[in-house]
Image: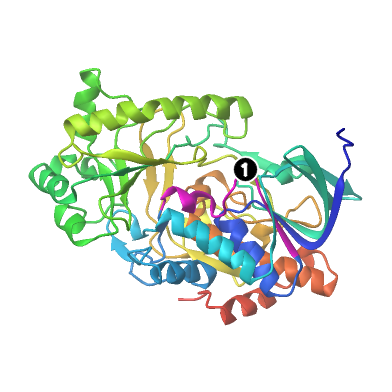
Amino acid sequence: MVNENKKEVLTYDVAVIGGGPGGMAAAVSAAREGAKVVLVERLGYLGGQMASGLPFLAFLDMHKRQIVGGLAQKMVDDLAAMDGTAGHRYCPFHISTTTVNPFYTRIICFQWAKDYGIDLLMHCEVTGATVENGRLTAVTVVGKGTEIEIKAKVFIDATGDGDLAYLAGAEYEKGEEGTGILQPPSLMFNLGGVDFDKFIDFIAEHPEELPYNMGLTHIRPGYNAEFFRNNPGHIFFGLNHMIEKLRAEGKCPIQRDTVIYIRLPIPGHVAVNTIRIQNFDDSNVHDLSRGEQETHLQILPLVKMLQENVPGFENSYVTYVNAVIGVRESRRIMGIKKLTAEDCIEGRIPDDSIALYSYFIDIHKGNGEGTYTKTIEEPYGVPFGCTVSNSIDGLMMAGRCMSVDHVAFGSSRIMTLCMAVGEAAGIGAALSVKKGITPREVDPQEVRSILLTHGAILKL
């Protein structure tokens, strides 16, 4: 046989590139509104970082009010039907946590794609974009050596890194203003065999291992052993004194000052979010290659450190390593609106908001240890224009690559908001197709009206 290098051509109303939380929500909502949708994903599963064990954060605000609904809430409801979540739990550190069974999220996403008639192209990477007279008209994806051209009326970049927008020549920003420093990535892995009672007893005896002395301004009282004991969906952040001591003894293999785990809705299991790489550009394939290698090689030394030094982890063992490194920050694609740090901190909710959120500003230092945090007292609104490219017609964004500044990104990058914004982007794309207009011409009030019929929360 001879490879004839034939290019397949497919035509859709809406093409969503990236099947993580934002892309999944965008594809579902566009299909729900009657659009013919294709969802392109580079991995062999859907759900992105949901499938790593990361929890949803801040469904609730500082006042314990639920501020995110819609498809994000439907995901939690579907997980609850499988005993795959502990539900929304108030947290003095993370505002609220909603843990997930990472493997069930994959199944739910595939079921959603089937239920809503979404065509899937798995194991495909976007490699090219065709822009004609300032409008994105086609993209090229490659999978298993096969080149596929996808023509669509609207494209949604849900790659996280803004890969499609970058290929199309859209305006973007990256990193901290003035320095370009990016937040560091992490590689998630899961452990089984954790004795939570023993670990929590240790924390009760050593409250100095809690993060109250780390200069983090957002933590409220009550983040303690009793909280962990009474909360089956908790996230632990701490052990900084132990790490400082072990590092002085040459026994700490990680480039950070804390251990973070998420208690999963699986008996004795945690997802560990502790490994990270500094001085890293997540949109550079050479850095990604180095990062995948270095983070994988940190896993077993870190597990050994936990087994030998942390009560409750003596018999822990690795059950799963995430398929890809978890990128916190890369490109932010500029839209016709831009969410700013001031918008978040001051709790501004403009009339064209398509999602509310209030997770604190959480910026992991990309060139050293530590984390900068800033409390958000009241929810802010994300304008619809943050999902619409300001430079390329027919291009929208869903998920963490939407239009925000670097500091606002410290809050907006969280999966809960990514799903809420993705749902709005999908509706906007479908309306664009129905009305024969560009996404920038879509009326945000019509998007809001449809969101509300599907359980979104847009006012307090």
Identify the residue at the far right of this view: 133
Identify the residue at the far left of this view: 205
- The answer to whether residue 349 is visible is no
Q: Which amino acid is tagged 1?
A: Asp
Does 319 lie within the magenta span?
A: no
Percent coordinates x, y for residue 442 in the rendering: 75, 70
Percent coordinates x, y for residue 116 in the rendering: 65, 71
- Displayed quadrant of residue 329: top right
Q: Is residue 321 left or right of residue 13?
A: left
Q: Is residue 80 left or right of residue 434?
A: left
Percent coordinates x, y for residue 2 in the rendering: 87, 32
Percent coordinates x, y for residue 146 in the rendering: 79, 41
Identify the residue at the far front of this view: 1
- Displayed quadrant of residue 250: top left
Q: Residue at x 80, y 48 (%)?
A: 139
Look at the image and give the residue range highlighted in magenta. Answer: 37-54
Q: Quadrant of the N terminus?
A: top right
- Please name whichever residue, 106 or 160, is drawn nearer the observer in this view of the structure: 106
Q: Is residue 79 left or right of residue 196?
A: right
- The answer to whether residue 105 is visible is yes
Which element carries disc 1, helix, strand or loop?
loop
Task: Look at the picture and state if 54 lies above or below 64.
Answer: above
- Please name whichever residue, 87 or 451, is drawn nearer the observer in this view of the structure: 87
